Amino acid sequence: MADRKTTRPTMDDVAERAGVSQMTVSRVMSGKGYISSKVRDQVNAAAAEIGYVQNRLARGLRSEQSSLIAVVLPTLGNTVFTEVLRGITDALTAQSFRPVFGLTEYCEDREYKLVRDLLSWRPSGIVLAGLEHSDQTRQAIAASGVQVAEVMDIDGAAISTAFGFSQRAAGQVTAQHMLDKGHRRFVYAGSQSGSDLRAGKRLEGFRQAVRDAGGTMVSEIISALPSSMVEGRRMTAEILSGTDRPDAIYYSNDDLAAGGIMHCLAEGISIPDDIAMAGFNGLPYLDALPIQLTTIKTPRYDIGLQAGQLLAMQGEVGPGTAPKLVDLGFELSVGQTC
């Protein structure tokens, strides 16, 4: 039987092919230290020619640190967190760091398992969504000493630094706008079985504003399925088929609200005369809808960018450093639905 074992190219092989020192190759691969663009291109070309791939894990084990940043997000099922991830990636790439990520699908236990597994790679930092994490997750992070950036929420206590906006305030602002338009009877439409804690905070803010103004929450309907336009259309049909119809529907996000618009257009239901609507996120595709949705625009890319910049620059966050909440705000975008 032929010997299938092969010898992998090494840094020394790259150095020999490029005609430079091993130290120069190391600097090019790590992205640290000054290297002229000519030499960097020369080294990268040599590495590509012989098929050299850097062993980042081995380098991380030697230095007790790697060029990896762990990113744990709830979902990539819509563009909300893809834009956050794009901001993180842009910030990290500029400083020669690389993101490795996993998805929790809004499951606390899955978040812990992902954090535990990703920490075994000894990342230089970790990004988490939201401020609510299990005790196990917090203990694992504390034991690792890794720097943390949390994203998309500031309603609570941060582990170290959180970048986002007030979810409760977003719900309050939406409710106040709908109330100012004369609506008094509301239905809330959500998804994910209520496991999206940030949507829950928005509902708290919305509910409180409605009650303070003497309005009524007719019902709160939360689907077990992930959010989608299809599910939003189905839920809207269910809401409007009942005898106790509301004046307005507050959707937990734009995907559900867009589905609601499609149902009304198909059934000849006038928006906002027969039913008013509002969503959340300000997703780009809304501009393509025949009716512009009233929603809250959120700075998703900037949130990811600033979180990535913090971790890439290795800012001082450790014992004695007070947790910090960075409010990047939001914008009420008034459309034609309310």
Image: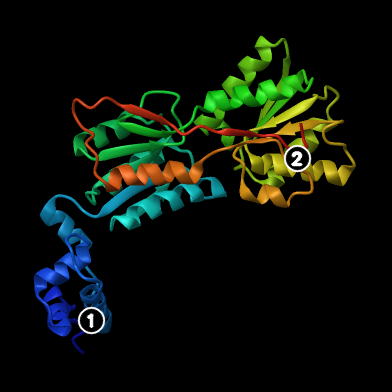
Amino acid type, residue under disc 2 in the picture: Gly
- Residue lying at the far bottom of the rendered structure: 2
User: Residue at the spot x=78%, y=34% of the render?
Assistant: 238
CB atoms of marks 1 and 2 within 8 Å: no
Q: Is residue 317 above or below residue 226?
A: above
Q: Where is residue 82 in the image (x, y as percent from the top left)?
A: 50, 51
User: Residue at the spot x=33%, y=46% of the render?
Assistant: 309
**Crowd around label 2: few <14 · some 14–19 · many ≥20 (10 Å):** many
Residue occupied by mark 2: 260
Q: Where is residue 286 in the image (x, y as percent from the top left)?
A: 68, 47
Q: Where is residue 297 in the image (x, y as percent from the top left)?
A: 59, 38
**Which image quadrant is residue 157 in?**
top left
Amino acid type, residue under disc 1 in the picture: Ala
Q: Nearer the viewer, residue 294 or 245?
A: 294
Specify whether 236 is left or right of 66: right
Specify whether 111 is left or right of 244: left
**Which image quadrant is residue 14 in?**
bottom left
> Is label 1 or label 2 in front?
1
Q: Which of 57 and 117 is in front in this view?
A: 57
- The coloring applied to the image is rainbow
**Crowd around label 1: few <14 · some 14–19 · many ≥20 (10 Å):** many
Q: Which of marks 1 and 2 is nearer the N terminus?
A: 1
The answer to whether residue 104 of the structure is visible from this angle is no
Residue occupied by mark 1: 46
Q: Is residue 185 above or below residue 158?
A: above
Secondary structure at badge 2 equals helix
Q: Which of 191 and 281 is in front in this view?
A: 281
Secondary structure at badge 1 equals helix
User: Residue at the spot x=77%, y=19% of the render?
Assistant: 185
Q: How far apart are marks 1 and 2 (CA)?
A: 56 Å
Which quadrant: the N terminus? bottom left
- Residue lying at the far right of the rendered structure: 268
